[in-house]
Image: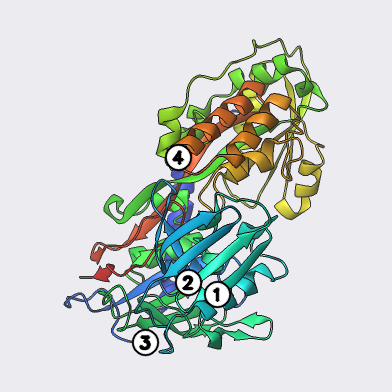
């Protein structure tokens, strides 16, 4: 039986999605009707509330010590000492200045900041929040392997000391998981952010896994927000989120699925390159890909353009390296990597693993199977849920593994990702790579001061990894966001830290 054409597959996919979208729209009708004020979408003066459909409900009661912290950040209710610019460099937020002396950093706090409960921001509040994070179990991932002590150095300054010199301390403190909240948020081991932040919107109600309500905070240190509030609904189903935008039930929709984006008015969809790369990891320790020449043969067999066009319908970027367009400096600094000549697979048997949690990855694996078979490999697939396949992947039980991987962690810096995935003692070394040249380049990058010198060291380390063919970069994903036509100023953030800001409003 012949394989259906891509056009036919897209037609069927679109028809199925359209029916599902219509059903979801009916189910969502009235979803935002009980918001805390006037709903968005009217012909008002820009003071309406903004209705937001978000992908995932909270997993930890909106605790900032969990991944729920990114919701607090995207709603502009909780803030950190430092924020990052587009290049990943640290900029002032609740701290206006900082300086380093050996292992200790001193941060000067912004004056005139009040929490949503009316109390002023002091060094004691910063010590409390950062110490709670440093002592949490588990720690926020930005503090993995970091011993951090925070002390007040006066009413408006704090010191942060690490066990060894760490050039990334300011970037680490930009993580939403290190937000600064008022004393009322901390009760025993739990952290409740309701009414405890410093941002332009105050979280006034959190209704479990269904919704959240935020109102404008008129005493915000940065000025008055243009919207009067935010009404949030959690809509895990991607078809339903897209339907909410199409039907006018939502003003801003995060994470529009690729299959739905093509069914929406193009004027309502924004795509932003995100720091996430789909990569084919090749096992360098055992099996066929222990041979560098066969790794080179696999690399040459891969046609990433067909993956972008077919699986992602053009809504992704073909990868020239591990670091993509969300880090624009990487392409400017990158030079061609040294490459091993390709060998003849001669029917070498390989198994490619991947997981079904991310809808596109099984289809990516199927196309890679065809491409590698065409090059002379015998290819089998093993697709499972991520929870049931991760341990085998990390143990090196596959010849190859397809993974969608964030290339910057919460610090905005890719050195940690490269070390984790490709150092001999890396905690996520699926390729089982142990290469002295790679290890040396990765260690050098990790120790280099932030700025241009560190970026050059990171790109040098990337080149060292690519020279081994332990990883074949395929494509870089995009953030696909839906904004109603009367929404102004919604953030399109590749790191997904910002969404509704001080300047976002509905016309």
SS for dot 2: strand
Q: Residue at x 36, y 74 (%)?
A: 51
Circle nearer the viewer, 4 or 2? 2
The local crowd at label 3, few if under 14, some if 14 to 19, many if 20 or more residues have their Cα within 10 Å, is: some
Establish if 484 lies above or below 303: below
> If you read the primary sequence from the N terminus, does the residue marked by circle 2 or circle 1 appear first?
1
SS for dot 4: loop
CB under 8 Å between discs 2 and 1? yes
The local crowd at label 4, few if under 14, some if 14 to 19, many if 20 or more residues have their Cα within 10 Å, is: many
Q: Quadrant of residue 436?
A: top right
CB under 8 Å between discs 4 and 1? no
- The numbered mark at residue 157 is 2
| 3D distance between C-alphas at marks 2 and 1 | 6 Å
Q: Nearer the viewer, residue 216 or 38?
A: 216
- Can you say which quadrant of the picture contains the N terminus? top right
The local crowd at label 1, few if under 14, some if 14 to 19, many if 20 or more residues have their Cα within 10 Å, is: some
> If you read the primary sequence from the N terminus, does the residue marked by circle 3 or circle 2 appear first?
3
For label 1, the residue is 152
Q: Position of residue 6 (x, y in %)?
A: 48, 34
SS for dot 3: loop
């Amino acid at each position: 039986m012949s394989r259906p054409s891509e056009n036919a597959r897209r037609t069927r996919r679109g028809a199925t999605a359209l029916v599902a979208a219509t059903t979801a729209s009916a189910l969502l009708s009235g979803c935002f009707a009980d918001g805390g004020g006037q709903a968005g979408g009217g012909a008002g003066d820009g003071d309406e509330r903004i209705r937001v459909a978000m992908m995932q409900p909270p997993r930890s009661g909106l605790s900032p010590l969990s991944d729920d912290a990114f919701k607090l950040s995207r709603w502009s209710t909780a803030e950190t000492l430092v924020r990052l610019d587009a290049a990943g460099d640290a900029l002032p937020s609740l701290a206006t200045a900082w300086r380093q002396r050996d292992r200790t950093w001193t941060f000067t706090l912004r004056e005139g900041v009040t929490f949503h409960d009316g109390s002023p921001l002091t060094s004691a509040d910063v010590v409390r929040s950062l110490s709670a994070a440093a002592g949490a179990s588990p720690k926020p991932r930005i503090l993995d392997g970091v011993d951090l002590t925070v002390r007040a150095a006066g009413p408006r300054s704090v010191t942060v000391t690490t066990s060894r010199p760490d050039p990334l301390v300011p970037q680490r403190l930009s993580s939403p998981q290190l937000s600064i909240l008022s004393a009322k948020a901390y009760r025993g081991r739990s952290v409740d952010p309701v009414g405890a932040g410093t941002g332009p919107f105050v979280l006034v109600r959190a209704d479990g896994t269904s919704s959240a309500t935020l109102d404008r905070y008129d005493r915000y240190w940065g000025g008055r927000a243009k919207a009067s509030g935010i009404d949030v609904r959690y809509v895990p189903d991607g078809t339903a989120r897209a339907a909410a935008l199409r039907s006018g039930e939502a003003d801003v929709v995060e994470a529009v699925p690729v299959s739905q984006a093509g069914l929406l008015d193009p004027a309502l969809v924004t795509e932003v390159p995100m720091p996430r790369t789909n990569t084919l990891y090749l096992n360098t320790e055992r099996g066929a890909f222990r041979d560098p020449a066969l790794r080179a043969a696999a690399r040459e067999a891969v046609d990433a353009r067909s993956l972008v066009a077919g699986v992602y319908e053009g809504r992704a970027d073909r990868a020239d390296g591990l670091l993509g367009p969300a880090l624009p400096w990487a392409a400017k600094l990158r030079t061609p990597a040294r490459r091993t000549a390709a060998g003849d697979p001669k029917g070498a048997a390989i198994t490619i693993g991947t997981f079904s949690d991310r809808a596109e990855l099984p289809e990516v694996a199927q196309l890679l199977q065809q491409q590698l078979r065409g090059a002379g490999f015998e290819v089998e697939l093993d697709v499972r849920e991520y929870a049931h396949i991760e341990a085998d992947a990390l143990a090196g039980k596959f010849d190859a593994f397809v993974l969608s991987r964030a290339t910057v962690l919460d610090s905005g810096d890719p050195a940690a990702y490269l070390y984790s995935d490709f150092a001999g003692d890396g905690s996520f070394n699926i390729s089982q790579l142990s290469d002295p040249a790679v290890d040396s380049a990765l260690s050098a990058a990790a120790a280099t001061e932030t700025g241009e010198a560190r970026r050059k060291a990171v790109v040098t380390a990337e080149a060292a990894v690519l020279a081994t063919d332990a990883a074949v970069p395929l494509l870089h994903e995009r953030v696909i966001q839906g904004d109603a036509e009367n929404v102004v100023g919604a953030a399109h953030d590749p790191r997904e830290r910002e969404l509704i800001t001080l300047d976002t409003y509905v016309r």
